[in-house]
Amino acid sequence: MPLDQVEDEEQEMTFLDHLEELRWHLIRSLIAIMVFAIAAFAAKTLVFHTIILGPSRIDFWTYEALCRLSEMLKSPALCIDELPFIIQSRQMTGQFSMHVTSSFVIGIICAFPYAFWEIWRFVKPGLYPKERKAARGATFYVSLLFLMGVFFGYFIVTPISINFLSNYRLDPSIMNEFDIISYVSTVITLILACGILFQLPIVVFFLTKAGLVTPELLRTYRRHAIIVILILGAMLTPPDPFSQILIAIPLLGLYEVSIFISRRVTRRELLETTEIQKHDE
């Protein structure tokens, strides 16, 4: 057999081996997601009555905390004591499909650290030693930021958004009767969006390592970022300064943390470059 043909077959097998390895990592991740999803599906009362429908009732933790805060600050506008809407199911499969969908999303959230660890196990061997060292603790930080974003989305963004949307009316004669599909989709979208949004420091870290982002660039566009964050806060919250600030502060904090991370990465790479140059001399 010609040498070129042997090398081609070895390369093909190596590629197929990688695909097989990736397949098993994905299978194990999917199994973990399905385990949590089945558990969530079985715990219907806890998942739907307590978790999913929690922000639709005024006894939700966030609303009670805002009312206590309004008493301390003597500002009645902060207290949310009414949510003028009802939830209906207008489709035959509406409740069942949302039960399945919400269970699957909870499975993704609960299994996210393990699923990311499985994917990271596949990616890590292909990195250079320097890249492995720089990405040490990636699973912990990515999972931590994702869960922080999920909690922020569930306890802050979701209830404030539900309060705003349920009280927003074009005319007093229009009643807010939300479909269960619309309600659950909104809650899931807000929570997952916050989980992804909280990955900003990680994204900036890798973009800085790739040379696409610098701390000077982030500082230059800080004012633009503040304006975008304030606009985002105004879109997600009722038209009062407190709610907008409540949303904007964590996002501004993430941006400042991203600048700090970018600066550290840049300094470290500069020191390493300087040491290499001295060693060569």
Image (cartoon, rainbow, N blue to C red):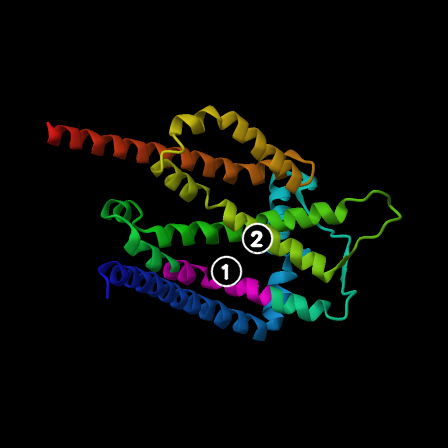
Q: Is residue 170 above or below residue 186?
A: above
What residue is shown at x 67% (from left), y 68% (from top)? Answer: 97
Q: Is residue 98 left or right of residue 226?
A: right
Residue type at mark 2 is Ile
Note whether residue 255 is visible: yes
Q: What is the magenta range?
A: 102-118
Which dot marks residue 44? none
Q: Which residue lies most toward the front here?
A: 2
- 278 relative to 36, above or below: above
Residue 266 placement: quadrant: top left
Q: Label 1 belongs to which residue?
A: 109
**Residue 256 point in image, percent of width and height:** 44, 34
- SS at mark 2 in the image: helix
Magenta: main secondary structure equals helix
Label 1 amino acid? Ile
In the drawing, does residue 243 fall left or right of residue 200?
A: right
Is 52 situated above or below 253?
below
In this figure, which residue is indicated by the disc labeled 2?
A: 191
Return the x and y of residue 147 as percentages of the image width and height. Answer: 47, 54
Task: State left or right for residue 168 relative to residue 243.
Answer: right
| Residue at screen point 34% across, 38% down | 209
Residue 14 location, quadrant: bottom left
Whichever of callouts 2 and 1 sits on the residue coming sooner in the sequence is: 1
Determine if the magenta segment contains residue 111: yes
Furthest-right residue in this view: 173
At x 70%, y 48%, the residue is: 163
Is residue 57 visible to us here? no
